[in-house]
Amino acid sequence: MPRIVILCFPWGATIFACFGYFQTKMQQPLSSEKTTNFSTNEGIQQSTLALFKRPWFRRIWVLQEVAAARNVLILCGPTGIDGYAFCLGVESLKEFNKIPADLQSLICSTTYLIRGAIFRSKHVMNRLGRVSQEICPLGGLVDMYHTRIATKRHDKVYYLLGMSSDDLRKANLAPDYRVPWEELLQRLAKFLLGEKISVETWSDKEIAIIKSKGCILGEVSSVYKDALDDSQGVDVIFKNIPGQPEDMKMHWTLRPSAKSIREGDFICLFEGASEPAIIRLCGDYFTLIMTAATPLEDTRLEEGYIEWSNHFQLVKQFVRDFLLVWDWKDSSENLQESEIYEILIRTNNRVSELSKTDREGLLDKATRAWNVASILGDLRKYKKAEERLREAIEGYKVAFKRTGTIV
């Protein structure tokens, strides 16, 4: 597909002004320090945000069209602007800091594809003889686009396959709408996170409850992200990287993600996975923020470079137990969601409706607290680990007292 045209309806004075500003930015020399008054005009900024709020930008099928294009033209009435120029204009508004996090993610992941159109080859046959745009690995695509709108849930997976640079021959993800949604999500989770995980899914939910062995690598100490930039930077303090000193601090540049990374998120590697994940502690379980958090660049040290894709393979010990919630909904965390997750986790942990007892439920919760305490200990968060350990011990005591067992 050589060109895709994006028609902006309805037209309005602010949209025209927005396009005019972008064209002005393109005409200025790169070395010029001259700026226009548009950069501080909230009307221009708001019209740009309103454009991205339109349903076209939120639909999953649009990504497939944009990814296949080698030229993107954005039209507003008689005025048109090249897609790459449009992205540069959007980027120039990055100091506008009143953008909601979910809209920031949507803008960044959209401009990520539009900006790359002019660099795409005319040849789409990849090294494996498969037709693919090879935008990036499937995990990165899912991290960016799993909150998009789809008529059928299957499309959130199938529409990304032609953009993936992975070898999908053994992934068992070939488009087949006869496959139940819950089974498709399980297949995808195992492809991204490793075959050794256990996954529970539901036909009417875009949520997976995942159990996995893993290893904590480090913690996000800082997040650097311009509101409208199509990448994000994080500083990571590593604790368990083979061949590297403890508390080593590194800067990573990552692709945009649908769920924003926060200071205090954890970097971990699951047994059987090829790429690290970013997770967030939520009570006595974790939410999955990114399934594929490999840096876009290798890190340069005095003695050479760290090739991260190879370095992760040196991790051999996966002794911690992780309980994870992978939620595809486009929403912020709140108390109601936490309660829903808790219900799903309890359902996932049940032995059966008949044999499940109150004691077993208490044991499950105590074990989850114990596992979190162990993970916090790996991060040298000893005070918080001790609190969780006490919580686990009290839970075990209460559970055994219910049956008269002395502990």
Image: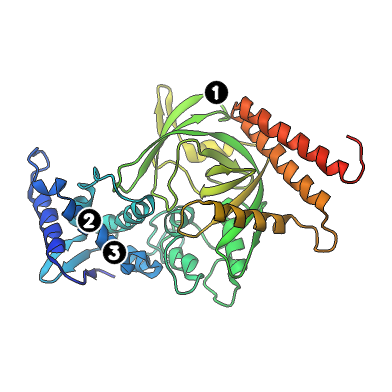
Of the 4 image quadrants, the one containing the C terminus is: top right
Amino acid at pointer 2: Gln
| Residue sitting at x 68%, y 28% | 386
Above-or-below relation of 222 to 106: above
**Is residue 40 toward the left or the right of residue 217 in the image?**
left
Q: Earlier in the sequence, mark 1 or mark 2?
A: 2
**Is residue 302 toward the left or the right of residue 247 in the image?**
left
Residue 337 pos. (x, y %): 55, 55
Residue indicated by mark 3: 122
* Image colouring: rainbow
Q: Earlier in the sequence, mark 3 or mark 2?
A: 2
Residue indicated by mark 1: 246
Q: Which mark is residue 46?
A: 2
Q: Which mark is residue 291?
A: none
Instruction: Say whether residue 258 is visible.
Output: yes
Above-or-below relation of 331 to 202: above
Q: Nearer the viewer, mark 3 or mark 2?
A: 2
Amino acid at pointer 1: Glu
